[in-house]
Amino acid sequence: MEAIKKQLHSQSYKLTPQREATVRVLLEHEEDHLSAEDVYLLVKDKAPEIGLATVYRTLELLSELKVVDKINFGDGVSRYDLRKEGAEHFHHHLVCVECGSVTEIEEDLLGDVEKIIESRWNFHVKDHRLTFHGICDKCQNENNK
Amino acid sequence: MEAIKKQLHSQSYKLTPQREATVRVLLEHEEDHLSAEDVYLLVKDKAPEIGLATVYRTLELLSELKVVDKINFGDGVSRYDLRKEGAEHFHHHLVCVECGSVTEIEEDLLGDVEKIIESRWNFHVKDHRLTFHGICDKCQNENNK
DNA sequence: CTAAATGCAAAACGTTTGCATATAG
DNA sequence: CTATATGCAAACGTTTTGCATTTAG
């Protein structure tokens, strides 16, 4: 939180109550993958006068600052995911095609793959997006009942 | 093309001129990552009376039949990518953050990673999406000029 | 005090849908 | 002949924008 405040100030962005409330909501829901609408509704509890447009603008700002990652699981909605402090790379996701649950994987499993990309394609990797679609542990068990 | 026709018939879908024209456009632009609008404009050259809605409906149908993959690079648009014949998995992409070029990687580099996912998370992988963001060969060279 | 940020409503955007008409099988 | 597919326009949900007003620094 403090780190984020400093980051805003250092680039001469203002720390408004709306922005603070939005960041707080994101921190309180680190595990989730909130849409802009979700964030809006949650922030409204803390700061009822906030407008949806401000939430969009704040989320875009945080996205530029690499505080959050904007992701898209293929339903028509963008979701926003807080980056773990100091995380070099975006984490991976497991999306269950049955129940829709999303599991996060913090570990970076792509080290070797990135080396191949760098050397064989001479592509300088800055970041990645990796999502697996399949059936989660829970749904596998339920199917076998 | 023939394979796709058979696949349509086998599930008692009709092979209309519009669908044929759409598939032809996709075949002619295998390398590209066309949006629905792109496809619409290209199909219109061949079959001017076609409607945008039909293109959407056809692309969705082809998506269900696993003839194309629907992808999203984070701009607000869905793109449609022809699956290579017999391809088990979706291919990977290298997106250049400077020039926007998209390179396809046919090889499946995720074999080992998927094994880890299956065993450690007990998640049964059906498909994956992997995109690297970075700087392509060409742009690296131009930056060093 | 002033540039930056906000709230609101309207507009824009990609996509989907209802319905009357046309057509592949 | 009939179920399926089409074209059109209207509807949809998400995101962006213009503008007058407020506010953090």
Image (cartoon, coloured by chain):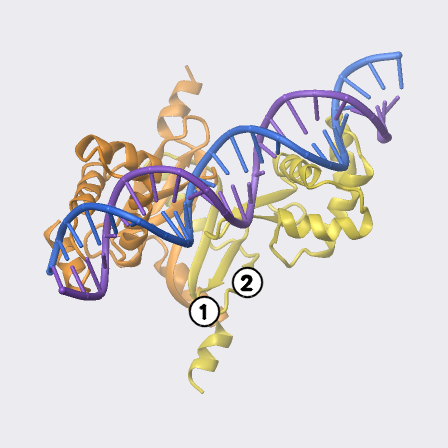
Chain colours: A yellow, B orange, C blue, D purple
- A105 with respect to B100 (left or right): right
At horizontal 65% and vertical 52% (from top left) the residue drawn is A38
Mark 2 and mark 1: span between their CA atoms? 13 Å
Task: Pinpoint residue D21: horizontal percent, then vertical percent.
Answer: 82, 25
| Quarter holding residue C18 | bottom left
Q: Mark 1 points at which residue?
A: A98
Q: Name the residue under label 2.
A: A103
Tell me which amino acid carries mark 1.
Glu
Q: In this view, does B35 lie above or below A144?
A: above
Q: In which quarter of the image is the C terminus of chain A?
A: bottom left
> Does any portion of residue B92 appear in the rendered image?
yes
Q: Nearer the viewer, residue A76 or C7?
A: C7
Q: Nearer the viewer, residue D12 or C15?
A: D12
At horizontal 19% and vertical 64% (from top left) the residue drawn is B11
Q: Quadrant of the N terminus of chain A?
A: top right
Q: Which of A137 and B24 is in front in this view?
A: B24
